[in-house]
Amino acid sequence: MDFFKELENSLQPGIQEIITHPFLKRMGEGSLTKKQLQYFTEQYSIYCNYFPRFLAAAAANIVDDVTRMPIIENLWEEHGEGKLAKSHRVLFNQFAFALDLTIFDLDEADALPSTQICVDELMNICLNKHFLESLGALGPGTEFFTSDEYLVIRDGLKKYDFLSADDIYFWTAHISLDETHYSEMIDILRPWASNDLNKQLITRGANKAIDLEIDFWNGLEKHLPKNA
């Protein structure tokens, strides 16, 4: 069997733990209160703000233009393809504003320990580890299933009558974008998966990223505001 198919199969237990996580299930059901949605949004904003930094750090360590190109294209899209008004941070903020959060609320939100560990560890992988480990984290460990994850979130958010299609566009846009990002990343990873060491690096990054995301969702569930 193809290495990447084997890897994807091996990651399924962790991915399913994320997709069926109790907190994500609450989101998909539309059962979170507005206050609880604000709580989620403040924590996810921290991850969202770090994501282009992960890409930039990973790109800096990639040794050739061909391998680097999909990361640069992803980074360019994250920044609105040169139009900052359309950057993904702006799209996310529009979602936050629809929940009556302000920029000050997002900037001053205290990261849960699990959120901080997630972004710190991912940054460490992208900045300080072998570039194949970082691509394993960002590709099979993230982009591979982000579309499925965001579909749950988007469908749940559609159940709130105070949120419009424009308000939740951040989530809708990524459902198709991340599928493209993943396929492009696998195309450039495939030539590197020619020996056991490289395969181990890719696999290590993917498993670590999924473990960190599980911890992120566990932290959200553990600290979910009650009676809010």
Image (cartoon, rainbow, N blue to C red):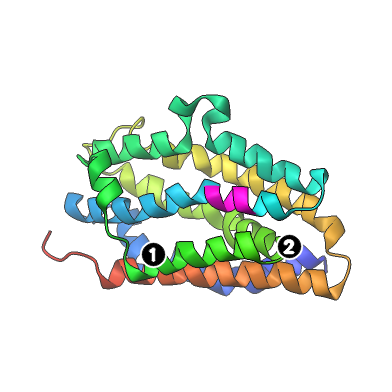
Q: Earlier in the sequence, mark 1 or mark 2?
A: 1
Q: Quadrant of residue 135?
A: bottom right
User: Residue 119's x, y, as percent?
Assistant: 47, 61
> Does the segment drawn in magenta span residue 137?
no
Q: Secondary structure at mark 1?
A: helix
Res. 196 mark: none
Give the quadrant of the N terminus.
bottom right
Range of magenta residues: 53-57
Q: Is residue 156 left or right of residue 39?
A: right
Query: What amino acid is found at the position of numbered circle 2 in the picture?
Result: Leu
Image position of 11 with respect to 89: above or below: below
54 shown above or below 80: below
Residue nearer the viewer, 81 or 193: 81
Q: In which quadrant of the rendered image does the C terminus lie?
A: bottom left
Name which residue type carries label 1. Answer: Thr
Q: Is residue 128 above or below residue 58?
A: below
Residue at which label 1 appears: 115
State whether residue 21 appears in this view: no
Residue at position x 30%, y 32% from top?
A: 164
Where residue 142 appears, as percent x and y from the top left, is: 57, 58
Q: Nearer the viewer, residue 111 or 144?
A: 111
| Residue 77 appears in view | yes
User: How far from the left and from the top, in percent, is residue 22?
Assistant: 34, 68
Q: Position of residue 126 (x, y in %)?
A: 62, 60
Can you tell which quarter of the image residue 199 is in? bottom right
Q: How many marks?
A: 2
Q: Magenta segment, principal secondary structure?
A: helix
Mark carried by residue 132: 2
The residue at 67%/40% (across/down) is: 72
Q: Residue furthest left?
A: 227
How far apart marks 1 and 2 lie (CA) works out to: 24 Å
